[in-house]
Amino acid sequence: MELESRKSYFIRDLIVRILLIVLFIFLLMFLFPMPNLNPFYDAIFNDNVQTMKDAAEKWYTTDRMPEKEGEIKKLTLQQMLDKKLILPFVDKDGNSCDTNKSYVTVKKSGDEYIMKVSLTCGSQTDYIIEHIGCYNFCKDGKCEVETPAPTQTATNVETGKVVVKKPTYTPTPSKVTYALEYEYERTHISEKWNLLDWQTTKMKETSDLVLVDTKTEYTGQKKVSNDSNIYKHIKDITVNHWSKDENWTDEVKDTSDQNKIRLYAVRTLYTGDKTETETVTKYRHIKVGNTDNWTEEDWRDTYVVPNNTTVLINTRYTLRKTTATDTTGYECGSWQKDSTWRTSKPNDTETVEWGDAYDTRTREVTTGTTTKTVWGNWQKDNTWRTSKPSNTSTKQWGDAWTSTTSSSTSNSYDKIVTTATPLTSDNTYTYKLFKKETVACTVACNGKATVTYYYYYRYPRVSTTSYKYYYRTTTTVTDNTTKKVTEYKYKYKNCKKKTNTSTSSDAKTVYTTAERDSLINKGYTLIKTEYKYKVNRPTYTADVIWTESITPPAGYKFDDATASVTRNVKSSLGKWVTNKAALGEYTEDITTRKQYKYYYNNPTTDTDEIYTESKVSPAGYTYKETYSIRDLCASKSYVENLVDEDVCNNMKDVYVDLGKWVSTESELQEYTYNKQERKLYRYKKRTVSTYTERAWFRSNPGKDWKATGNSRRVQN
């Protein structure tokens, strides 16, 4: 019984505890409800849409926009990922969005473009629409159309119902914080001056239209009958006369001028030798003789009596005189080093003796300055111009480094257009409606009682190409004129004056007795007499020669000696043949030579003449003389085909237009009849464009930013 009682108490306590826990959970849910995460999920979806929109705006440049009215260009999310325009993103559940059903389209509608950005993630599909105005796309200068922020809608795929979303913000879940961002916008204004083309219409100047230049142009006519001429032109014509020289020649002639001489044939000739053996008798002849060999010996102090082999050729005398002399000199100390740099060694003085340099250096010394003007580097000028400015002495203009073409509407219309349907602007004209009229229909009414006509002014569109040019300016460069200078440090001695007595011995050598006696009279003493001899030591020779004749040559004697000699003898073919086979056995020491035949030109000069209506000679011709057409008609020269006979029969004054306008009257030349002139004007026009910049801030950025009234929650 006690055990059962304890078990019943335990079950009861357990049920009570479970009920208390359930009650506590319900109280917590009542006091702290689950946060609404829909705004957070919507913010993620909106960020993904904005990412696609921003990438599409950068992709759709001018050349990628639709050109025809109603044309649509489409770019899917998959294509954007393939082109690396955006990075992959996921939806609220962490899944990838549908890359084929998600897309961006741009449609041309009038003068603007409509961009639609559609995103499909799971069962949620949403889109935004943006109107694109001027920037790079509009043609008439209108700026971006301000449209109210589109109402975001979502379509439930399962039910097909469209639900309008009005974001409401509720407390954020724990551990996740959010902040409010506000959208601000500001307007940028840019101003640009365009140089218009020359025009004949003078317009009223305004703050946006300024006259920059004027000029006068001229045109006229010329008479082509009374004063017309034909002109004779001549040129020398060279007529070639080629002749063939049939004779072969060994001479190699210069054929570089193919108009004078040309080679037309070449042949090779051959000749050679052959070796034969023969025996001959030779005779020995001897000639004995001697050869004088005179040798000049050195000086000797002994005298030899001259004879047939010894000849005295010179005599010399040596004399000496001793003299005592007092000399004044200087006694100097040891060498010292001077520390001063000098360009040359100083002169010695009574107290200082200068020695060699012990140190040297080379340095550059400035001797003056020069200035010169040079052209600097090419730079880019950022001003748009319709033509390159003229060069000045300090500024030089180069080629264009970029260009742009703009289209504008002319201020004057050229035609009134009547249509039965409304017109829009095209690439050639801009139409301005000035009257709309409804009248009774009389032709091709198709059941309509009335028809409406539209009357337009048609304004031509003008394309202007502007350029930015390279330019460079002069700059003054200063150069220093320098030269290299070598400097030295010298050794020196300090000296003092000193008198010394010295004995000098003066020795002289003379070669005649008169000079010897003159020196003796002056106190010199003869100390040595020397002699020079030339001695003959002859050499004896025996010259032996062998000849094929027993009769000795002059001066030789046959000594009865003979000898038989066998030798090889080469015999020559003695003629030239045209191939090696014709040499036969004469195949040794083959010699060749070339022979040539030439064409020679003996040109003659003829004169060609033509007649033209211009005094300017055709290429290669020279003006010779002028013929008056009226004079030729009077002299019946048309028989020679100089003038057509019909021209003479119908001779009358005819005027021909110059066909263009020139800047000065001198350029009219002979077109001076019925002269006209016109004045041209050139204006520059200012174009002001604006565009709006939008950005998100958490607080008012100030300055020129203005709130748009839009806000969003973002996760911190």
Image (tube, helix red, strand yellow):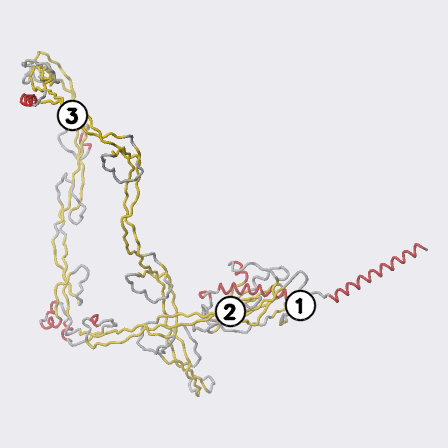
SS of the residue under disc 3:
strand
Q: Which residue is mark 3?
A: 325
Which sits in the foreground, 356 or 122?
A: 356
Question: Which of the 4 image quarters holds residue 419?
Answer: bottom left
Between marks 3 and 1, how big is the CA–CA gap? 135 Å
Marks 3 and 1 close (CB-CB < 8 Å):
no
- Dot 2 amino acid type: Lys
Between marks 3 and 2, how big is the CA–CA gap? 112 Å
Question: Which of the 4 image quarters holds residue 350?
Answer: top left
User: Residue 48, image x and y in percent?
Assistant: 57, 63
What residue sits 50% from the left and 68% below the top?
693
In the rendered view, does 369 fall on the left or right side of 186? left
Q: Which residue is mark 1?
A: 170
Q: Earlier in the sequence, mark 2 or mark 1?
A: 1
In the rendered view, does 30 fall on the left or right side of 203? right
Number of residues whose C-alpha sits closer than 10 Å to that of mark 3, classed few (under 14), some (14–19) or many (20 or more):
few
Q: Which mark is residue 520?
A: none
Q: Nearer the viewer, mark 2 or mark 1?
A: 2
Marks 3 and 2 close (CB-CB < 8 Å):
no
Marks 2 and 1 close (CB-CB < 8 Å):
no
SS of the residue under disc 1:
loop
Q: Which mark is residue 703?
A: 2
Q: Earlier in the sequence, mark 3 or mark 2?
A: 3
- Dot 3 amino acid type: Thr
User: Residue 99, image x and y in percent?
Assistant: 57, 61
Number of residues whose C-alpha sits closer than 10 Å to that of mark 1, classed few (under 14), some (14–19) or many (20 or more):
few
What residue sits 16% from the left and 38% below the top?
595
What residue sits 12% from the left and 55% below the top?
605
Which sits in the foreground, 194 or 702?
A: 702
User: Residue 372, image x and y in percent?
Assistant: 28, 55
- Dot 1 amino acid type: Thr
Residue 162 visible in the displayed image: no
